[in-house]
Amino acid sequence: MTERATPFYCPYCGDEDLRPAEDTHGAWECRACTRVFSLKFVGLVVRS
């Protein structure tokens, strides 16, 4: 498992020009809409 997974697109505008944000660990900066966001893996759902 990797320590940092790379998102493929911005969840707000859908653009693919993303860079790691330097201010916060795990945060990503979208160059198109100038938003900074972070993603969090919560877990897996076990369905029976």
Image (cartoon, rainbow, N blue to C red):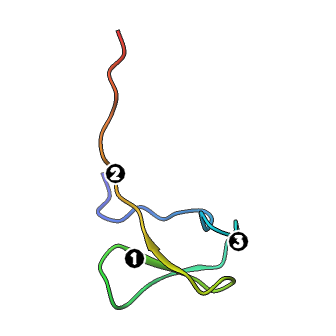
Of the residues shown, which amino acid type is indicated by label 2? Answer: Phe
The image position of residue 11, as x and y in percent, is 59, 63
What is the CA distance from the residue labelled 1 to the residue labelled 3?
16 Å
Instruction: Tell me the tag on residue 15.
Output: 3
Between 5 and 23, the one lying in front of the other is 23
Q: Which residue is mark 1?
A: 27
Secondary element under disc 2, as helix, strand or loop, is: loop
Give the mark nearer the N terminus: 1 vs 2.
1
What is the CA distance from the residue labelled 1 to the residue labelled 2?
13 Å
Between 10 and 17, the one lying in front of the other is 10
Labelled pair 1, 2 in contact (Cβ < 8 Å): no
Q: Which residue is mark 2?
A: 41
Of the residues shown, which amino acid type is indicated by label 1? Answer: Ala
Between 9 and 2, the one lying in front of the other is 9
Of the residues shown, which amino acid type is indicated by label 3? Answer: Asp
Secondary element under disc 1, as helix, strand or loop, is: strand
Spot the residue most to the top.
48
The image position of residue 2, as x and y in percent, is 32, 58
Instruction: Tell me the tag on residue 39.
Output: none
> Which quarter of the figure has residue 31?
bottom right
The image position of residue 6, as x and y in percent, is 48, 65
Count residues near mark 1 (Cα–Cα under 10 Å), then give few for <14, some for 14-19, many for 20+. some
How many numbered circles are shown? Answer: 3
